[in-house]
Amino acid sequence: MDNQTVIEQDLRQIADMLLLNGTLTECPGLVHGKMGIATFFFHYAQYTENMLFADYAMDLIGEMLDQIHVSSPADYEKGIAGIGVGMDYLIQKNFLDVEDDICGDFDDRMVRAVMYDPWPDFSQYNGLTGYGQYWMTRLRYPDPSVQAQKCLSHITALMEEKLPEISIRKQTDVFYFLHDLQGISGFDGCTGLLEQCRREWNLQSADVARSFPRLGDSAIGRIMRMYQWRRYFNDPLQGEIELALKQIPDLDMEKVPAGTGLLTGYAGEGMLRLTALNQTDMSWMILL
């Protein structure tokens, strides 16, 4: 079989496994749970032109929303911050056409997480950078934009205050967050902080493999590191990315992925293969 046929066969197996296990996944979140699985199924529905897969994605989102309550975790990896960013991604991709602001119910919890709750660190998956990713998406919506500006200003002030204490493992999370934020109108003031990070952390000359330690050594992580390095430092890595996509190993059903989510699970394996078939661009990787 040629490579395209193998990838298409893998995709069918991935979709079957997720149809069986998606609603059984306990985690509602973006990186490991229902939000990430729904993201795959919306893209897969577009690829197959079978809207039953989109209906299943909507079912997953409904179940996910039923799981969320006022004291749900705020973190990006498994909690509300990542779910909110995932919902915004689906809206921007026109997979969701919602008149009501679904994430409006999340805002009070995320204000509390930034302004009042103890925060563990500056990481994206568990800390303030992930909260900031959520609030950057909320700037696009008129009603929560004032809260978003206050929360983002508070996060950047804490980053400036604690800059010498930020560990090497968190530095790329902080740098990429500030890079995105300084491109938004009204946050030009964080450009100085961004340049200070660039100088003091020597990120310009850092190895690609140093970035995003949270991603581990998954195939998705390796490709995403190259994608993000090109995105933020204009490194000419496109050829390496295309080669990596061509070399995705065949799905081995004897050695199944660790879970169902985007980072180490079936949903991520599916998204990689849709990307390899040019059925979606790589923008989904910014979710991780």
Image (cartoon, rainbow, N blue to C red):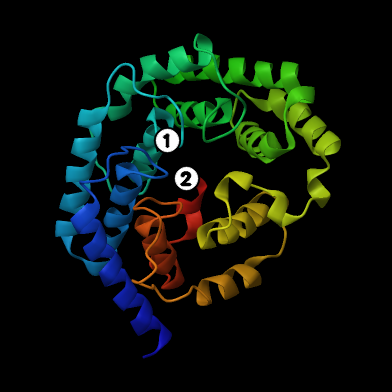
Residue 142 in the image: above or below residue 48: above
Spot occupied by residue 142 in the image (x, y as percentages of width and height): 39, 22
Residue at image point 39% right, 68% down: 255
Figure quadrant of residue 8: bottom left
The amino acid type of the residue labelled 1 equals Gly
Mark sitting earlier along the chain (2/1):
1
Q: Is residue 55 visible?
A: yes
Query: Quick check: marks 2 and 1 in contact, CB under 8 Å?
Result: yes
Mark number displayed over residue 59: none
**Crowd rating for badge 2 (residues with CA inside 10 Å; few <14, some 14–19, many 20+):** some
Figure quadrant of residue 101: top left
Figure quadrant of residue 103: top left
Circle 1 residue: 82
* Residue lying furthest bottom: 1
Spot occupied by residue 112 in the image (x, y as percentages of width and height): 44, 12
Circle 2 residue: 287
Residue 212 in the image: above or below residue 175: below
| Quadrant of the drawing holding the N terminus | bottom left
Residue at image point 76% right, 55% down: 207
* Residue lying furthest front: 254
The amino acid type of the residue labelled 2 equals Leu
Label 1's element?
helix
Spot occupied by residue 129 in the image (x, y as percentages of width and height): 57, 30
